């Protein structure tokens, strides 16, 4: 696909560990393995009967993100996407079925929708597949989260969200990953993030929705920590979400990720 890279939708079976943890070998729960290339996409045509889908991909700022969806223009259904400020839809290409000796009239194909993201941040694109003249629910809806990091930053191999809390990351020394958690400073609550031995914080960024400026009061944002694994061993990332005065006395972590670093043979 013109040198573009499709993000995989799954990374294999998780391996159970002690203390209720699961080892994640190739990526977080974001639905698609982060890549942080200049042109990365996800193929959502595996299950054409599903009514909704939620995925995420990671690119370099200035690059393009694309999604491949089932499509059949002969039915009157059309794909439309709502994009936030900071994202531009730059392409929508239909690919018909593979030609055969007796092609089916009206057979469906796929549509590749491409978005360009010039600036760093976290963006959410929402698409619907419906007939424009009908008021009923769309035949399918999709939600695509796009992570865009500055080209000058290291390209992390994995992104971990709240859903990944109490899991474990198996990786090599020298690798990088991102912890992406919902934040809402307007409530007075903030994240206190602690990195165990052998981990180094490279960047710490808060991204407001749709890159609005000034930030919308009361609207949650995304807090991203870019972290590098520097040493071999077992360590952890822990986060507490609380009022600053309560953070020091709160016992249970609101987010935790065990990091198991060893040299691959």
Image: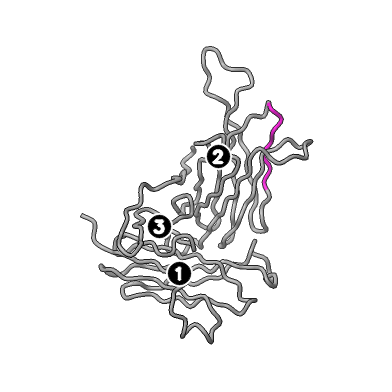
Residue 74 as seen in the image, left or right of residue 23: right
Q: Which residue is mark 1?
A: 255
For the residue pair 252 and 192, the one nearer the viewer reads as: 252
For the residue pair 265 and 183, the one nearer the viewer reads as: 183
Q: How many marks?
A: 3
Label 1: which secondary element: strand
Q: Is residue 75 above or below residue 151?
A: above
Q: Is residue 77 magenta?
A: yes
- Label 3, label 1: how far apart the Cα atoms are: 19 Å
- Label 2, label 1: how far apart the Cα atoms are: 33 Å
**Which mark is first along the chain, 2 or 3?**
2
Q: Is residue 98 above or below residue 146?
A: above
Q: Which residue is mark 2?
A: 68
* Tag nearer the camera, 3 or 1: 1
Estimate the x, y position of residue 201 in percent, counting from the top left. Answer: 41, 73
Q: Specify the label residue 157 is tagged with.
A: 3
**Which mark is first along the chain, 1 or 2?**
2
Estimate the x, y position of residue 257 in percent, counting from the top left. Answer: 39, 66
Magenta-tinted stretch: 75-81
Estimate the x, y position of residue 51 in percent, counting from the top left. Answer: 60, 40
Q: Is residue 252 magenta?
A: no
What residue sits 32% from the left and 56% below the top? 16
What residue sits 50% from the left and 54% below the top? 59
Q: Residue furthest bottom?
A: 245
Estimate the x, y position of residue 105 in percent, counting from the top left. Answer: 63, 18
């Amino acid at each position: 696909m013109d040198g573009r890279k499709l993000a995989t939708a799954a990374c294999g079976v998780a391996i159970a560990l002690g203390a209720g943890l699961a080892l994640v070998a190739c990526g977080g729960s974001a639905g698609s393995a982060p890549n942080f290339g200049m042109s990365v996409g996800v193929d959502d045509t595996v299950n054409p009967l599903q009514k909704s889908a939620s995925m995420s991909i990671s690119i370099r700022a200035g690059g393009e993100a694309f999604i491949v969806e089932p499509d059949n223009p002969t039915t009157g259904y059309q794909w439309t996407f709502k994009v936030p400020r900071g994202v531009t839809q730059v392409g929508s290409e239909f690919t018909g079925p593979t030609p055969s000796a007796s092609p089916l009239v009206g057979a469906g194909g796929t549509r590749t929708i491409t978005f360009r993201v010039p600036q760093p941040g976290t963006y959410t694109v929402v698409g619907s597949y419906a007939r424009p003249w009908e008021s009923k629910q769309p035949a399918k809806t999709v939600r695509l989260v796009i992570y865009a990091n500055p080209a000058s930053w290291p390209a992390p191999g994995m992104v971990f969200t709240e859903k990944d809390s109490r899991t474990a990351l198996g990786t090599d020394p020298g690798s990088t990953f991102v912890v992406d958690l919902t934040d809402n400073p307007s409530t007075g609550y903030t994240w206190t993030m602690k990195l165990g031995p052998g981990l180094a914080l490279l960047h710490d960024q808060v991204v407001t929705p749709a890159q609005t400026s000034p930030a919308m009061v009361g609207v949650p944002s995304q807090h991203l920590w870019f972290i590098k694994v520097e040493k071999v061993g077992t360590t952890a990332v822990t986060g507490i979400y609380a009022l600053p005065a309560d953070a020091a006395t709160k016992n249970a972590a609101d987010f935790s990720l065990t990091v198991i670093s060893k040299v691959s043979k």
